[in-house]
Image (cartoon, coloured by chain):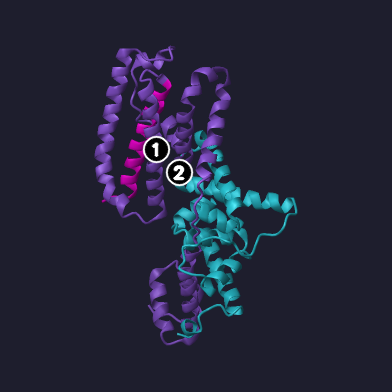
Chain colours: A cyan, B purple
Amino acid sequence: MKSIAANILGSVADAEDAVQETFLKVYRGASGFRGGASPTTWIYRILVNTCYDQIRRRTRRAEAPLPTKVALASSGESDHPLRLALEAELRRLPASERAAFLLCEVEGFTHREAAEILDVPEATSRTFLFRARRRLQESLRATGAFAPAEASS
Amino acid sequence: MKSGCRDLEKALRGDAPELRTAFEEHAASCPACARELAEWAQISAAGPALKKRWASPELWPAIRQQLAEQSQRPRVSRAGFFSRALPGFAIASLFVLASAGLWVFRNSRGREPLTSSWQTTKDPLLTERAVDEVEAAEKQYLDSIDKLSKLAEPRLASATSPVMLNYREKLALLDSAIADLKSGIEENRFNTHLRRELLAMYREKQQTLQNLMKEVPS
């Protein structure tokens, strides 16, 4: 949960705030959960919405824009150039596409689960992911982030 | 199935696995499509490396504290009686947050009835006989949980999916809540509230294990 919040919000402190807020919302809303989705995807949906609420609040307060680089330990072995570029480009994606990419490609959720979390039909979730990859591909190609050997293979 | 450059978008969308296979065959002899696939693959391969991990030693205590405060609010008039049970409340709440298990607790159709003497008593402390009955109910849950745990253990040990990791995390939280409540009960085995919370924890753990077994059949 912290991971997806950090990727959406771009900071450790904000991610922890979002997780904390999510748990409180789950607590307050537990009796309203009627089993339309699995508890896990229901909680993640609240988390994703909480993160976007935070961003909206931040925008309304006209605070500094989202940081483009986050000082976090990632699970990757090193700061691979492609990973760094991907992280930066991800922040430029529309919210729905970024969320679909984070859920499926980073967190490993299936399309069905991602669709439940995003509260959209599965086909829409697939479209979000497709568009996200497409935009990322175009941006990364423009910045020359792809490995040349693999790109030409 | 034959495929060509025109199928690029459909193949990349991944709606039809057979089309993807046919497109890969086409790409083997088409440098432009091969490049598209390679770049696509690089993005997918780099995705998991964006997962963030960091230690948050203060996060869970902060959540626990907030939950304790939340659960305390509606009980202001009875604070004297419940004050000793607050740590149990906090942990119980924590598990509810982690799992939305409160919903299951409140709405469980298969809920086992508690003894009528316990359910209707207005006395905050249990009688000796009621304690025996509650302990018998606890034992039934424990037996069931033991059996389910043995079956679930191999599935949890090899868990890699986020859903399974969530199950593992939830079970760990439940175990922590159970241990905390048991330690409170050791101090006063007649405390109705702690007993009730403990049974709720057992019920939730049993339900969680059953859900896990359904989610990942052997």
Examine the residues drawn in magenta and state their main secondary structure: helix
Residue A28, visible in the rendered structure: no
Q: Rate crowding at label 2 as few (under 14), some (14 to 19) or many (20 or more) other CA atoms within 10 Å.
A: many
SS under mark 2: helix
Q: Residue B114: image x %, image y %?
A: 34, 21
Q: Is residue B43 magenta?
A: no
Foreground residue, B175 or B149?
A: B175
Q: Which residue occupies 48% across, 65% down?
A: B49
Q: Is residue B108 left or right of residue A45?
A: left
The residue singled out by tag 2 in the image is A39
Q: Is residue B200 magenta?
A: yes
Q: Rate crowding at label 1 as few (under 14), some (14 to 19) or many (20 or more) other CA atoms within 10 Å.
A: some
Q: Chain of mark 2?
A: A
Q: Chain of mark 1?
A: B
Q: Residue B42: image x %, image y %?
A: 48, 74
Position above or below: A91 against B179: below
Q: What range of the chain is rendered magenta? A: B193-218
Q: Residue A126: image x %, image y %?
A: 50, 62
Foreground residue, B183 or A74?
A: B183
The residue singled out by tag 1 in the image is B176
Q: Residue B55: image x %, image y %?
A: 49, 52
Disc 1 residue type?
Answer: Ser
Position above or below: B113 against A25: above
Q: Do labels 2 and 1 touch, CB within 8 Å?
A: no
Quarter of the image with the N terminus of chain B in it:
bottom left
Residue B154, visible in the rendered structure: yes
Q: Is residue B58 left or right of residue B137?
A: right
SS under mark 1: helix
Q: Which residue occupies 35% across, 32% down?
A: B202
